[in-house]
Image: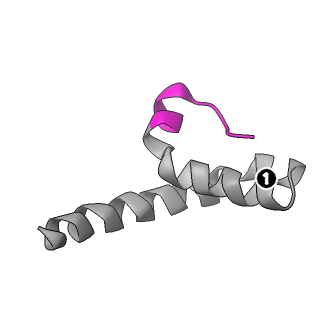
Amino acid sequence: MMYLAIAGGVPYFAIGVIWLITHDSHLGDVAGLDRLFSSIGEVIAWPVLIIADIQLR
């Protein structure tokens, strides 16, 4: 069961990081913890962000 969690989580995280790297233009407007939490939110919520075409701020 742990193998399935790892096998599913690694690609999800990798796609989230790629999404963050390619859609980071709004991060210049924020600093400190806001920047950290915005980055984490984009990595976690990338499927929703693709569908909604929005940026977290």
Q: Nearer the viewer, residue 54 or 2?
A: 2
Marker count (numbered): 1
**Which colour scheme appears in the figure?**
one colour
Residue at the (60%, 57%) spot, across then down: 40
Quarter of the rendering occupied by the N terminus: bottom left
* Amino acid at dot 1: Asp
Residue 26 location (% of width, % of height)? 78, 46
Q: Is residue 3 rendered to the left or right of residue 29?
A: left
Residue at the (87%, 58%) spot, across then down: 31
Residue at the (62%, 60%) spot, across then down: 21
Residue 55 location (% of width, % of height)? 67, 37
Residue 41 location (% of width, % of height)? 59, 49
Q: Nearer the viewer, residue 25 or 47?
A: 47
Q: Residue furthest top?
A: 52
Q: Residue furthest left?
A: 1
Q: Quadrant of residue 5?
A: bottom left
- Magenta part of the chain: 48-57
User: Is residue 1 a member of the stretch shown in magenta?
Assistant: no
Tag 1 secondary structure: helix
Q: Is residue 45 rendered to the left or right of residue 33?
A: left
Residue with the mark numbered 1 = 34
The correct choice, above or below, for 28 with respect to 11 in the image is: above
Quarter of the rendering occupied by the C terminus: top right
Residue at the (65%, 49%) spot, across then down: 23
**Label 1 packing within 10 angstroms: few (<14), some (14-19), many (20+):** few
